[in-house]
Image: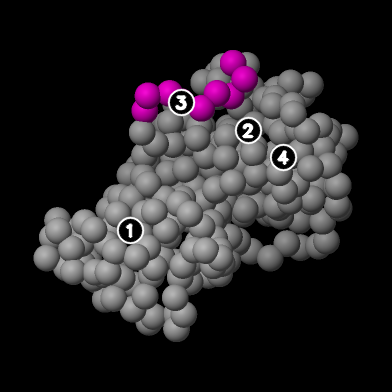
Amino acid sequence: MAIDLITRAQWQARAPKGSYDTIARTKGVKIHYTGGRVDPATVEDHDLCAAAVRGIQRGHMEGNGWLDIGYSLAVCSHRKVFIGRGLHHLPAANGAGLNSGHYAVLGLVGNSGLVVPPDGMLHGIRDAIEYLRKEGGAGPEIKGHQDGYSTDCPGPKLYAWVKQGAPRPVGTTAPATPPAKAGKAPPFPGRLLKYPPTTAGADVYSWQAQMRDRGWDLIPDGSYGPRSAEVCRLFQRDSTAHGWPLDDDGVVGTATWRATWERPTS
């Protein structure tokens, strides 16, 4: 499966104050919202999303006295999934005595400011649910925080979506980070990114993320498989048609790597 994960290092998370309790599996997932104001500007500026997640972690650790952010994962409007406590770690956000039953997934909306979850966020929450099922032993249940706990969370908009079965939006395009501007490419990783066989690693993720940011339909997952090869070929053909000739081979070599960052986007 494909999911655009933001690691704790990438969102500059604080280290937990202790060790997590572990869970092997859960009944499913509970969906949350912040319960406060979320700046609508987060829809346009992804850096604000990371800052918001850091603020939530600070409030949970300093205000609630928890060892870390309470959520397993958090999802922003750009279909990006922030790793909170992550897989097989007991969350703290579902309520006392209830955390072992469900992973906790936050949608980055609140009760003021940004209150309606954009389609990109709904897609991202579905990505998170599928990831938790495949990798974390999550069961089939999809519930709101208010199911079994006295709270308004996850708010009327998200909860209505949960009650519908949390379907993926149909006929819409998920919001994305604005297209990347051309700039100097980072150093070539020293190996070809190609398929088959599947190539995996941080260099693959970096290339996929840049392609995504340029507007290509590719979700970074660090695994260069058939979809990455297909997008690479399309990019190579498009580059050649726009006066930046590249071999049409679906392989990210030195020329394609450089073009990924340096070829003008217009």
Label 3 neighbour load within 10 Å: few <14, some 14-19, many 20+? some
Q: Nearer the viewer, residue 175 or 202?
A: 202
Disc number placed over residue 32 in the picture, else none: 2
- Judged left or right of residue 148, residue 123 is left
Q: CA distance from mark 1 to mark 3?
A: 29 Å
Disc number placed over residue 169 in the picture, else none: 3
2 or 4: tag closer to the N-terminus:
2
Q: Position of residue 93 (x, y in %)?
A: 72, 39
- Judged left or right of residue 212, residue 57 is right
1 or 3: tag closer to the N-terminus:
3
Disc number placed over residue 133 in the picture, else none: 4
Which amino acid, mark 2?
His
Residue at screen point 70% across, 25% down: 143
Query: Can the viewer see residue 246?
Result: yes
Residue at screen point 33% across, 58% down: 233
The magenta stretch is: 164-172
